[in-house]
Image (spheres, rainbow, N blue to C red):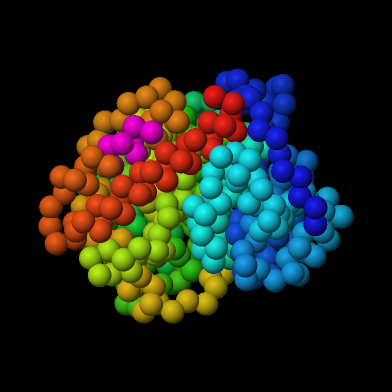
Amino acid sequence: MVFDVPVPGPVRPGWYINKELRQPTATLTFTTIYQAEVLEAYHQNLKKFGHLDQVEVVVIPDRKTPPTVFERARSLCGRGLKVHCPTLEEQGVFLRSVGFPPELVPFNSDNRRNVGYLLALASGSDFLISIDDDNYCTDEEDIFAQHAVVCAEAAERTVTASATGFFNICSLLEFDKPAPVYARGFPYFARHKDENPRLTRESAAVHMNAGLWTLDPDIDGITWLVAMPHVKSFKGSSVVLARDTWSPVNTQNTAIARDAIPAYYFIKMGYPIAGMPIDRYGDIFSGYFAQACVKHLGGAVRVGTPVAEHRRNSHNYLKDAANELACILLLEELLPWLRELRLSGATFIDAYASLSNEIQAAVERFQGDLWTDATRGYFHQVAYYMRSWLGACRQILGS
């Protein structure tokens, strides 16, 4: 289908949406190499709850994406769902138009979701919804309304604080058999400890919302090999993370406010770290980095609803575990540093720029077998990509 590359425009003034003046808008995006059947579920949900006019969907094809995805997009456009499905050539044209070199977004990689994020920023939507192509919404819950919390004004919410500094979001799920289950990206140094969660009612402005999942939880390959858990249901209460409490945030069923998109770059993977491959944690690094900026700017992260059915695509869990191990080891050392880091800047762009500089300096100080010259070189490159991403965001926003 023909894809109209949006023309970058000025930043919309203000952070929150005055619902008396107009309704918020969202861009929902994902990348796929499958049939994109998930689009049918989102069309049905948005139609049922009356949000078809408020949401545009951007599907980012890759080299392996079948032509039937474009056909499905055309069909759904005829049924009222605004779906854009840019070809690889059109994606390259757009990236060059905003000053982001296309070669920084590798093919055959989930890193291509970055194209969707930049298109969402350029579209002027009030918030971004990021999903995987196996995250199915249901008819029971208004997915748009739940994620639109990132556009709401500060309000009194249930806030949870953990004694370990990390909240296990899987504790909000009911599993078919009792076992300690932790989300992918939850640090191992904080597992199997008493979080002693403390609930309070506080005013919070949510900038990032992480929806959970039934059926197959988002856990690492090690946990899949050991436990093979299955989620029966969500326990029913969303919570906001306290200022000193963190959690992994992925790109599955996650929403982020427009102003925060510049801090949500999906980190490039695919490098050997200390002789080990590194993969499958680009979203986890991006989630923690964005979370650092949200906390710095006084915002909050909410976890819980909306809940998606995670009908997981086929996986080789042994291969997943091998590809994730280096990332797991890196997080064990990076997260304590990140929690203590004090960023600078009064905007998400400035805070993310500050973070990129801090990362580049910090990796030179880290010691141990993991911190080879190649590892340090990788994070120098990550910091460079983060700043390149910010350059594209600035060009889109006209700043």
Q: Choose between 148 and 290: the one closer to the eye.
A: 290
- Say whether residue 317 is left or right of residue 313: left
Q: Choose between 99 and 222: the one closer to the eye.
A: 99
Furthest residue toward right: 78
Secondary structure predominantly adopted by residues drawn in magenta: helix
Q: Is residue 257 magenta?
A: no
Residue 21, x across and y down, in percent: 72, 21
Residue 49, x across and y down, in percent: 74, 46
Q: Choose between 37 and 205: the one closer to the eye.
A: 37
Marker count (numbered): 0
Furthest residue toward left: 368
Quadrant of res 50:
top right
Quadrant of res 224:
bottom left
Quadrant of res 281:
bottom left
Q: Residue at x 38, y 77 (%)?
A: 319
Q: Quadrant of the N terminus?
A: bottom right
Q: Would residue 282 be seen by someone viewing this image from the given angle?
A: yes
Residue 67, x across and y down, in percent: 74, 69
Q: Residue at x 52, y 54 (%)?
A: 103
The stretch in magenta equals: 353-359
Q: Residue at x 63, y 51 (%)?
A: 92
Q: Would residue 242 be seen by someone viewing this image from the given angle?
A: no
Q: Residue at x 67, y 37 (%)?
A: 123
Q: Choose between 133 and 240: the one closer to the eye.
A: 133
Using the image, determine if residue 178 lies above or below residue 389.
Answer: below
Q: Quadrant of the C terminus?
A: top right
